[in-house]
Amino acid sequence: MKSPLYGGRRQSAAATPENTFNSPSSSSASSRKSAKNTVKYAARSVADALMACFTPPEQEKSSSNALNDSFEASSSGSERRRSTSRGIYGTLNDSTHSKQPGSVKFTMEEILKATRNFSPSFKIGQGGFGTVYKGRVEDGTLVAVKRAKKIAYDKHLGTEFQTEVQTLAKVEHLNLVKFYGFLEHEDERILVVEYVPNGTLREHLDCLQGNVLDFASRIDIAIDVAHAVTYLHTYTDHPIIHRDIKSSNILLTEHLRAKVADFGFARLAADGESGETHVSTQVKGTAGYLDPEYLKTYQLTEKSDVYSFGVLLVELVTGRRPIEAKRELKERITPKWAMKKFTNGDAILTLDPRLMRSPANNLAMEKIFELSFQCLAPHRHNRPTMRKCVEILWSIRKDYKELSTSDVIPLSSNSNSK
């Protein structure tokens, strides 16, 4: 299992592990009703397609290397990106740290000093890639030190390390983990990134942090993630596909701002200017989040991230994992179960039971499901772009806040009249 674990607590031993594939290969009542019927019709058409997301491809096909030569970082390109006005997507990191992201190649001595010789008391997590430690570098910056497993010259882990270094060095956004530097020496492969102290989204949905995420926070988190992925797809020098968008790869700050992490599976998208429509590559990702079209055709596009984001939206509404192996058969695949309930007019039955049922929550739930099912369309051409997802989510949040306020006002008026 690949897990960022750059901050927060370790995964609960009782938590169901996620299987990671690394195979070869937004009017009137009538208009609202019409739109809803359209979505529900589309939902029915994709129910069976969801099943394909949980079975890896059977045959090996030739694939291009996960590391593309053009993935080499360009300092001139980075400077050009930083100097271009792109609104929220061009915003530099709001760090108060003196270190500039990605500017340091650390020495082993610095790493050992920061982690007190990889002290067990500094260990904050462990995943398929290796172990993560909390540390403090010389200027006082708190960091997360991700130390790769010492498996001599492991090809896949080595490739993931290089991919993550090269991707993190290229990107800079409020909703992406900051990258401070790395170390690559002999059998040591180490990443030094931002320490995000409040755990993963999955931990919060499982209430491992002690508090239930309210619906407003869940909408905010969805918007943060959508901003991050939109940035990767649209506002970098070359579009980047994350390829592993999931709740355990989303870290939360003390103020519940979301930061997307773990770029080990990231890949440059096709060059649209050259007429390319996709990248042919081996299937990588996590069971339950994988784009079924990508699984069948080995053709990777930005819409594969959109599909994973659709699964994440269902996860935020229901609180459930994409695959719930211990539930009865008809509820094991959460997106398929939720889609069927929504189609039958029973979407309220899928709402996380820890959330209050209110007009605002109910409306937001319906609207988010409408968006998620667009994202889960079997064919990529029918899915929205991440930028469109952002626009829809902003509209949902606006309506949610207005309805939440109107819910409170009558209560106040009634209490004043007594």
Image (cartoon, grey):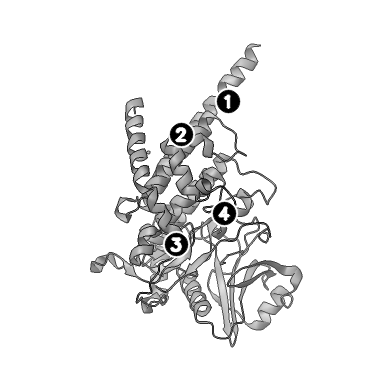
Q: Which mark is residue 399?
A: 2
- Cα distance in 3D space between marks 2 and 4: 35 Å
**Amino acid type assigned to the residue bearing label 2 in the image:** Asp
Q: Which mark is residue 103?
A: none
- Cα distance in 3D space between marks 3 and 1: 47 Å
Say which residue appears at 64% left-offset and 61% top-offset. Answer: 7
Task: Please name the residue that numbered disc 4 is placed on.
Answer: 325
- Cα distance in 3D space between marks 4 and 1: 40 Å
Is there any visible trace of residue 402 in the rendered image? yes
Is there any visible trace of residue 253 in the rendered image? no
- Cα distance in 3D space between marks 3 and 4: 14 Å
In the rendered image of this protein, does residue 369 appear above or below residue 7? above
Q: Which mark is residue 55?
A: 3
Q: Is residue 76 left or right of residue 180?
A: left
Task: Please name the residue that numbered disc 1 is placed on.
Answer: 408
Nearest to viewer (mark 2 / mark 4): 4
Residue furthest toward the left? 275
- Cα distance in 3D space between marks 1 and 2: 15 Å
- Earlier-in-chain disc, 3 versus 4: 3
Give residue 171's position: percent from left, percent from top: 46, 66
Q: Secondary structure at mark 4?
A: loop
Nearest to viewer (mark 3 / mark 2): 3
In the rendered image of this protein, does residue 175 appear above or below residue 164? above
- Earlier-in-chain disc, 3 versus 2: 3
Residue furthest toward the front? 329
Q: Is residue 308 left or right of residue 121?
A: left
Mark 3 burial class by Cα count in 10 Å: few <14, some 14-19, many 20+ = some
Give residue 359's position: percent from left, percent from top: 52, 29
